Amino acid sequence: MSTTTPTRKLPKTRVDLRQYGILAALAVIVILFQVLTDGRLLLPGNLNNLIQQNAYVLILAVGMVIVIIAGHIDLSVGSVVAMVGAVAAISMSQWGMPWWAAVIISLLLGAAVGAWQGFWVAFVGIPAFIVTLAGMLLFRGLTLVFLTGGTINALPGEFNAIGGGWLPELFGTIGEGRGSRDILTIVLGVLAVAMLITQQVRSRAKQRSLELPVERSVSFWIKNGVAAVVILALTFQLSAYRGTPIILIILAVLILLFTFVLNQTVFGRHVYAIGGNLFAAQMSGVKTSWINFFVFVNMGVLAGLAGVVTTARAGGAVASAGQSFELDAIAAVFIGGAAVTGGVGTVIGAVIGALIMGVLNMGLSILSVDAAWQQTIKGLVLLLAVAFDVMSKRRAGRR
Amino acid sequence: MTAILSMNQITKDFSGGVRALDGVSLEVERGHVHAICGENGAGKSTLMKVLSGVYPVGSYGGSINFENHETAYKSINDSEADGIVIIHQELALSPYLSIAENIFLGNEIATRGVVDWPKTNREATMLLARVGLDELPSTPVLELGVGKQQLVEIAKALSKQVKLLILDEPTAALNDEDSAHLLDLINSLRGQGITCIIISHKLKEIRRIADTVTIIRDGQTIETFEMKEADATEARIIRAMVGRDLDSMFPPHTPDIGDELFRVENWTVHHPVDTTRKVVDDASFSVRAGEIVGFAGLMGAGRTELAMSIFGRSYGSHISGTAFKEGKEISVKSVSEAIGHGIAYATEDRKHFGLNLIGSIAVNISAAALSKLSRFGIVDRFAENKVAEDYRGQMNIKTPNVSVLAGNLSGGNQQKVVLSKWMFSGPDILILDEPTRGIDVGAKYEIYGIINDLARQGKAVVVISSELPELLGLCDRIYAISEGTITGEIDRADATQERLMHLMTAGKD
C-alpha cells in the first residue's frame, strides 16, 4: 500500500477491468451470434429492430440502476408501463388530446406513481420490495379498470413514431433504391464521435493541468479509437435501413443525462453514499429520506416514458402490456455489475447489460430457437454474470 | 478451600504481532464470586474467550485446569458441556421467540425431534422462579427490558447445569433497580454452590458481592487479593488498574487558548429503546478556542452517546439541554444543522458510521461538504480530486492515488480519511471519538500531530479516549464521565491516571 510516487511523474490511474469485463462479454456474444447467424445479426434491419425492440429495457434499466444503487428494488415498473400506456391511449382517443399532451400526461402520471411509492419507502419506512410488489398488483389492476378488458388502437401517427419511427431524411440519401444510405444518420454518427473525442481530450487536459493522475496515453487512445470505430460502423450500417430511429436519439440523451447525474451531481453522489453506507451518509448530513423519495420519483418518470414508447411501438394500449418488464430491467442492471447490497453500479453498465439481453433475444430468434429455451438461456446468463461478479469481488477482498 | 479453575501463564497473540495476553494466571475458588478488573483493552474479555473456547485450544499458550482436569475446548459448545457458561454484554437472545424457547434454544427438550412443550414450559417456569423473574414462559423476549433479558440469559445458563458462570459487565446496561436485583441473584447463586466470574468497572459493585478480585493490566495479572482483607480498598484496585506505561510519544504542544467557543448545559439523553434509562444525565461542559479537551470514561460510561446526541441527535431519545456556540444558543436537531454550526464528529466506529468503504478516498473526503465543491447541484470532480490529493499529501495518507476504495486502506489511513473529511467541512468544533483506536504507533503519532495543528488553528477539539496516557499526553483539560454523569474536571497540570480512574469509577451512590 505504501507506494511513494516519484517526483514530477504523475501516477497513472488503473484501468477498471471489471467494467471492461462485461463490455468484453457483450463483444463476445455479438461476435458469436454474428458467426452463428452467418452475419444476419448485424444486418441493417436487425440492428434497427434491436434498438427499437429493446428501448423499453434500456429506459427502465437506467432508472432501475439508480434504485438498486440506493439499495432498493422496483417490481412495479411493468405494471406502471401498462397503466401509463392505457391512460395515454385514452387521453388521445377518448379525450381528444394531441399526441404531445398525451406524452406530458404520461410523464406526470409516472412521476405521481413514483411519488406515491417513494412516500411509503422513504417516509413511512416500508421496504421497497413490499411497496413495489403492492404497486405491481395495484397498477395492473387499475390498468384493467381503465381499459375494461379491451384494447385501444388507432393512435395518431406522430405518437406511434416515438416508438417505431425514424428521423426525416433531411440531407437525402446516397444512392437510390435498396442500396441507398441516409446521410443524416452518418452525419449524426460522425458528430457523436467528434463530441466524444473532444470531451475526453478536454477532460484529460484539465486533469493534467490540475496535476491529477491521468490514464496512460496508449490505453486512452486505443479506448477512444475503438469506441469511434464502433460508433461509425454501427451508424453506417443503420443508415442503410430507414435512417435514425427517433428512439435512438431519446436513448442517447437519457444515457448521457443520467451518467452525468450519477457522476457529477450532488444528488448522484448522495445516492451512492446511501447505498454504500446508510449510517455514514446520515452522519455526514445527507438527507437520506428525500434522496430515496426522488430516486423513486425518477424511476416513475422513466417508467412513464417506457409506457409511452411501448404503447407507441405497439400502436395501441392493451392491459397485458409490460408483463415482466421489471424482471428484464433488474436482470440488465445486475448483469451490468450492480451490487445486490447497493452502492455499486453504473448507467453504462446497465445499458450494456440490457444490450446483452437484447442481443441474446435477437440472436436466438434469428436462429429460431424455441421461446422456452430462450428463457432458460437468459436465466442461466443472469446467474452466471452475477456469480462471476461475486466471485471476482471475493477474490479482490482476499487480497 | 479448593480451586475450581486455574489458568496458568496464558498467552495469546493476534495477527500483526499484538500480544493481548502475556502470561496471565488466574485461580478461582469453588463457590466464590471472583471479580476481574482492568481498563478497556487490558485483556479481560480475551481471557474469558480463551477460557470458554471461543479461541480454541492451540491458539493460545499456557494451560487451563477446570475441576481437576486440563481443558482442551475446541469451541464454546465444549466448555458449555463442562458447565462453563459465559454471558456477554450484548445479550444473545432471539427477540421473537418466547422466554421458554430461548432458554432451551439449541438444547430443546424433545423426543425424536418433536418438542415436548408441556415439559419445556414446566422446566422454564421452575428456572424463572430460581432467577426471580415473574413472567410467563410464553412471553416473547422482545417484550422484556434489558434487565429481565439478562435474567433469561442466566436461566438459560442454569438449564445447562452451569458450574462456572461468567458475566461480562452484567450491569452496564441496567438501571439501578435491575442492577440491585441482579447482584442479589448472584449472591443467592453463590449460596447454591455456583461459582461466578464477574467482569466489572463498578468498584462499589465489586465491594458488595466479590470475594476475590484480580486486576489485569496490559495482558498481565497485576495482583489478586481477598476483599475481606483489611487493605482491600477501592484505592488499591485503582492503583493496580492504572499505571499503564506511557509508551506513546507525543509531539510537542504549546497551548494557545482563547475564549470559550462551545458550551453544553444540562444535557440529558435517554436510551433510544429503554426510554426510562438515562444514558447521559445532566452533563455540562465547555471548550475554548485552541483548547484540546479530553473525555475519560470506561466502556458504557456514555461518552459516545453524549457526543452523538449533540451531533444532530444521532443517538438517544428525549434529549434535553442547551448548546451554545460563542455564547449564543444554537439548535443542533439534525446532522446538517450541526455541520452548519461548524461541529464535526469523527466516529469511533469508522466502518459502520464513518466511511463508505466501497467508495473512493476522494468521495469519502468530500462527503460532508459536497456543497463546497458544487454549483447548482453539479459536483466539480476536478476540484474534488484536487482537494483529496491535497489532503493525501497533507495528512500523509499512504495510497497510490485517491481513487482507491476506502475499504482497501489500513486502519490508520482510514482514520486519516475520516479526519480529512471533517477538516474539509471547515469546522470550528471537532469531536474526535477514539481517534487512535486500532492504529499502529507511528500513525498514532501522526494523528496526535494533526490534533495539535487543529488546536493551533484556533479550533476547539474534544478527544474521547479509553487510553488514559493518551488523554494525559494530549489534552489541556480532562472531564471524567461515569454512568452518564460528569464526575469531575481536571487541568492538565493536576491530572494523574489515578485521579482520573477514581472519577471514572465514582458511580452513583
Image (tube, coloured by chain):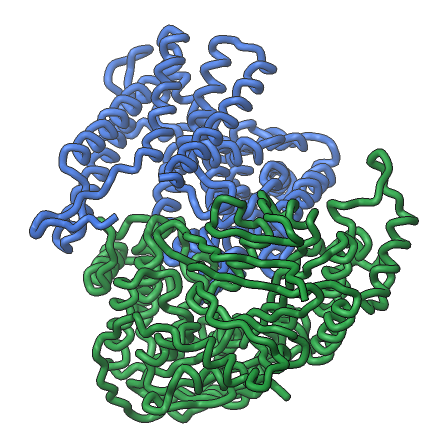
User: In the image, is residue B439 above or below residue A216?
Assistant: below
Query: Could you tell me which residue is drawn at 63 percent across and 71 percent down?
Result: B173
B345 and B5: which one is in front? B5
> Residue A157: image x %, image y %?
50, 31
Q: Which chain is green?
A: B
Q: Position of residue A197 (x, y in %)?
A: 19, 38
Who's the residue at 43% across and 44% down the image? A344
Residue nearer the viewer, B218 or B335: B218
Judged from this view, the residue extending furthest toward the left is: A8
Q: Colour of chain A?
A: blue
Left-right relation of A148 to B253: right
Q: Residue furthest front?
A: B1
Q: Is residue B68 visible?
A: yes
- Outermost residue to the right: B118
Residue B502: give x, y in percent of width and height: 49, 85
In the image, A134 versus B233, the foreground residue is: B233
Residue visible at 48% across and 61% down in the picture: B24
Q: Residue at x 38, y 24 (%)?
A: A26
Front residue of this view, candidates A109 and A373: A373
Tell whether A214 sits left or right of B293: left
Figure check: B484 above or below B222? below
